[in-house]
Image: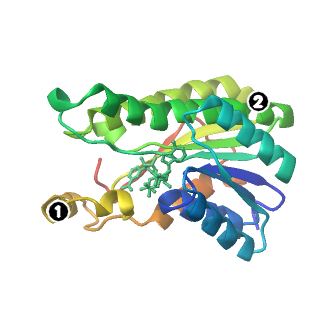
């Protein structure tokens, strides 16, 4: 129980990688608040966390809305009492080739992935500064490191998260708060289920380990970065990709 008596906030925690991270942290003793925009899935995921014996709150928060984010964090403090861990996981893709990409496609991906990470980090950091301790982990992507055709918006948002992580890590390092990022490769979730079969096969051929990752591979990396074992690691980007980006 490495995380007993700690409280984690996981954005986009109703399904996929976020849900898996929430479950992993809860199994180590953390109480968890989930921020998401899907009320039925949110309640289902919160119930799974409670079944592990933890306190859990599913809170409807659109991470692009500063008021909803601030109100959501206030609810976490009211119900769970503190904020020790923030996992910025909410993210979307809206793919298209650059010359056909419209403004709305660009804005939506940048707003959810990057602005959402900024708003949640700012709100959580205010509380972590009071506690003089905190762990912030943002889910970037190898696409933010190496690019991908058809994903200029997504690549920019994820590269933005990496720069943001390093700046925040430097600002908060002296206050007992670490800030790191995880850059997953291709992980089996609804996001990658949408890939056409041919694209999936091409991907498999390019991954040295010959398989997509699973949400639990990212969850284990997140657990490490929020644990005491990683107390001297900040501003780092941990790649979890079966060797794809090397
Ligand atoms: P997912 O299954 O689509 O889950 C993302 C969750 O975030 C969904 O429940 C989604 O709700 C929610 N969300 C979307 N917009 C939101 C908003 N404005 N406010 C709050 N919540 C919102 O995605 P995933 O595959 O688990 O990915 C999780 C993270 O890992 C993302 O940041 C993604 O970019 C990153 N990642 C994934 C992969 C991969 O291969 N899967 C690889 C690298 C990085 P809706 O269902 O309404 O959209």
Question: Is residue 23 visible in the rendered structure shown here?
Answer: no
Q: Picture coordinates of residue 185 (x, y %)?
A: 35, 53
Q: Picture coordinates of residue 86 (x, y %)?
A: 66, 45
Q: Nearer the viewer, residue 69 or 148?
A: 69
Residue under label 2, please give it: 126
Asked if 41 appears above or below 122 in the picture, the reply is below
Q: The N terminus is located in which quarter? A: bottom right
Dot in front, 1 or 2: 2
Residue under label 1, please give it: 205
Q: Residue at x 26, y 42 (%)?
A: 95
Q: Quadrant of residue 94?
A: top left
Left or right: 150 with respect to 53?
left
Q: What's the CA distance linking mark 1 and mark 2? A: 45 Å
Q: Quadrant of residue 124?
A: top right
- Evaluate if marks 1 and 2 touch, with contact meaning CB atoms under 8 Å apart: no
Q: Nearer the viewer, residue 239 or 232?
A: 239
Q: Residue at x 79, y 45 (%)?
A: 75
Q: Which residue extends farthest front?
A: 40
Asked if 106 appears above or below 82 in the picture, the reply is above
The answer to whether the beta carbon of the residue marked 1 is less than 8 Å from any atom of ligand 1 is no
How crowded is the residue under tag 2: few (<14 C-alpha within 10 Å), some, or many (20+)? few
Left or right: 19 with respect to 93?
right
Q: Quadrant of residue 27?
A: bottom right
Q: Picture coordinates of residue 120 (x, y %)?
A: 63, 36
């Amino acid at each position: 129980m490495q995380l007993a008596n700690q409280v984690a906030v996981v954005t986009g925690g109703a399904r996929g990688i976020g849900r898996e991270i929430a479950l992993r942290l809860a199994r180590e003793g953390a109480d968890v608040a989930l921020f998401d925009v899907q009320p039925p899935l949110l309640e289902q995921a919160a119930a799974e966390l409670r079944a592990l014996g933890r306190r859990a709150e599913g809170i409807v928060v659109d991470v692009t809305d500063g008021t909803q984010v601030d109100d959501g964090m206030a609810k976490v403090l009211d119900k769970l009492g503190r904020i020790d861990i923030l996992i910025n996981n909410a993210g979307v893709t809206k793919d298209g080739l650059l010359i056909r990409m419209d403004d709305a496609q660009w804005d939506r991906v940048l707003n959810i992935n990057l602005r959402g990470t900024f708003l949640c980090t700012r709100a959580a950091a205010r509380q972590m500064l009071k506690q003089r301790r905190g762990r912030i982990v943002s889910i970037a992507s190898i696409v933010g490191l190496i690019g991908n055709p058809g994903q200029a918006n997504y690549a920019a948002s994820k590269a933005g998260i990496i720069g943001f992580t390093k700046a925040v890590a430097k600002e908060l390092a002296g206050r007992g708060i670490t800030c790191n990022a995880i850059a997953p490769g291709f992980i089996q979730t609804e996001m990658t289920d949408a890939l056409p079969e041919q694209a999936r096969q091409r991907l498999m051929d390019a991954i040295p380990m010959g398989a997509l990752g699973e949400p639990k591979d990212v969850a284990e990396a997140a657990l490490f970065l929020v644990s005491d074992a990683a107390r001297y690691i900040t501003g780092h980007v941990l790649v979890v990709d079966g060797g794809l980006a090397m």
